[in-house]
Image (tube, rainbow, N blue to C red):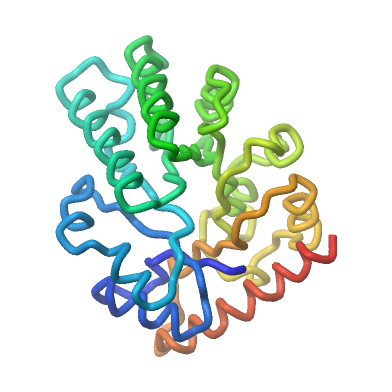
Amino acid sequence: MFAIHDYFGFDFPYAERYRYIAQAGFKHVMMWYGDDFGVEFRATNRPAQARALGLAIENIHAPFDECNHIWEDTPDGQRVFAGYLQMLDDCAEHDIPTVVMHATRGHEPPQVSEVGLARWAQLIARAEELGVNIAVENMRFGLALDYVELLLETFDSPRFGYCFDSGHYHARRRDVDWLIRWPERLMALHLHDNHGVDDEHLLPGEGTIDWPVLMAQIAQTGYIGATALEVGKTVPAGTTPEQFLALAYACAQRIHEMRERA
């Protein structure tokens, strides 16, 4: 089964994006929750829009522009934390199994703090109560400390794991073998390509990732979720949504077959 993120390079209304995605043959979609912490999401009931077209919801992506605040003992920290709690409630209400989150943003995040760790503990406890998974995304922007590793080592919960982002791994940190070190805690995939320097979000095969090796590693984790693309940061001029999604579907099919053969 294949999934694609509901932003794939085109700024259409979400209902129109879901129609294009379904027409391209995808059966699963990953959703963006929204920088407004779900105001638009709740007002439009996007899960119902997608499901009406036959799309299952693989996961939803939390807003991340303000994620550093969660480590701060400030009003902004409490506001962002409350927004994440609401997001978990929204996931439970709309039967969305997993939320993908960022632990930090940028090259100079706040220091690890007791208030931040306490908030993560409360988020994980709420996820356990609601039956929702939290998948923290592998990221490291030259930091001495990897916050994702810290969180995985601190909180051992069946509802807390990680989202493996192939682009982040290839361009930013290849010294941690996520799929080998934590195979049982893999909860989501963001698959896209780059040339090992920038996070380009290219279609698989357009960069330098060794896809047969990577898909074999994913297969060996035992992960049963969708082969999920997060692509479309740059779409060639003149490309239509139908053309891009046809290419994306063919790429998803190709790398999924690598996974099945492994």
User: Does residue 144 show up?
Assistant: no
Q: Which quadrant is the C terminus positioned in?
A: bottom right
The picture places residue 59, in percent across and down from the top left corner, at 45, 53
Residue 250 appears in the picture as rendered: yes
Residue drawn where x is 49% and y is 84% of the image:
24
Residue at the image position 63 percent from the left and 60 percent from the top? 195
Residue 112 falls left or right of residue 167: left
Q: Nearer the viewer, residue 54 or 115?
A: 54
User: Looking at the image, which residue is at 51% across and 41% down?
Assistant: 137
Q: Is residue 72 above or below residue 41?
A: above
Q: Nearer the viewer, residue 124 or 5?
A: 124
Q: Is residue 39 left or right of residue 50?
A: left
**Residue 254 relative to residue 130: left or right:** right
Tally of numbered discs: 0
Q: Please state which of residues 138 and 127 is positioned toward the viewer in this rendering.
A: 127
User: Residue placed farthest to the right in the image?
Assistant: 262
Q: Nearer the viewer, residue 104 or 207?
A: 104
In the rendered image of this protein, does residue 119 appear above or below residue 27?
above
Residue 14 in percent (x, y) is at 28, 71
Residue 260: name its quadrant. bottom right
Q: Is residue 35 above or below residue 152?
A: below
Q: Is residue 176 above or below residue 188?
A: above
Q: Position of residue 28 (x, y in %)?
A: 49, 67
For the point 27% across and 27% down, the residue is 69
Residue 31 at x, y = what percent?
Answer: 38, 59
Instruction: Say which quadrant the N terminus sits in.
Output: bottom right
Location of residue 196 by image quarter:
bottom right
